[in-house]
C-alpha cells in the first residue's frame, strides 16, 4: 500500500478541499443542498480518488488512477 500523503497533488487537493469548505460556509443557506453540496463533493472527490488509488494492491490497479493525478496536476492550485 502506497502512502498517499507523500504525493504533492494529494496535499494540494486536500488543502483546496479544506479551503472550499471554509469558503462555502459563507454561501447562502438556501444553497446548502444545491451549489454548496455539489462544490464540496466535487472538491473532496479529488483527494479521495488519489487515496483510493494508493490503496490498490497491484501496480496495474494503481496505474488506472494516474490519469486522475495527471488531470488534477494540470490545474494551478
Image (cartoon, rainbow, N blue to C red):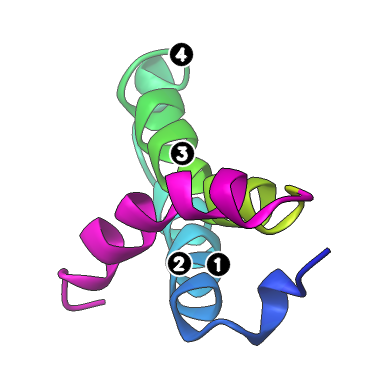
Left or right, residue 10 beside residue 57: left
Q: Earlier in the sequence, mark 3 or mark 2?
A: 2
Q: Secondary structure beneath disc 3?
A: helix
Q: Earlier in the sequence, mark 3 or mark 1?
A: 1
Residue 28 visible? The answer is: yes
Q: Earlier in the sequence, mark 4 or mark 1?
A: 1
In the rendered image, the vertical position of residue 54 relative to residue 35, given as above or below: below
- In percent of width and height, residue 66 lies at 40, 57
* Residues at discs 3 and 1 in contact (Cβ within 8 Å): no
Per the picture, the main secondary structure of the magenta-coloured stretch is: helix
Which marked residue is nearer to the observer: mark 3 or mark 2?
Answer: 2
- Between 25 and 34, the one nearer to me in the picture: 34
At horizontal 55% and vertical 63% (from top left) the residue drawn is 18
The residue pinned by badge 3 equals 40
The residue pinned by badge 4 equals 33
Q: Secondary structure beneath disc 2?
A: helix
Magenta segment boundaries in residue numbering: 57-77
Amino acid at each position: 500500500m502506497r502512502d498517499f500523503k507523500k504525493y504533492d497533488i494529494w496535499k494540494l487537493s486536500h488543502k483546496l478541499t479544506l479551503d472550499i469548505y471554509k469558503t462555502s460556509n459563507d454561501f447562502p443557506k438556501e444553497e446548502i443542498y444545491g451549489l454548496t453540496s455539489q462544490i464540496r463533493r466535487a472538491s473532496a472527490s479529488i483527494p479521495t480518488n488519489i487515496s483510493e488509488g494508493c490503496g490498490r494492491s497491484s501496480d496495474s490497479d494503481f496505474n488506472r488512477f494516474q490519469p486522475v493525478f495527471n488531470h488534477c496536476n494540470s490545474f494551478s492550485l
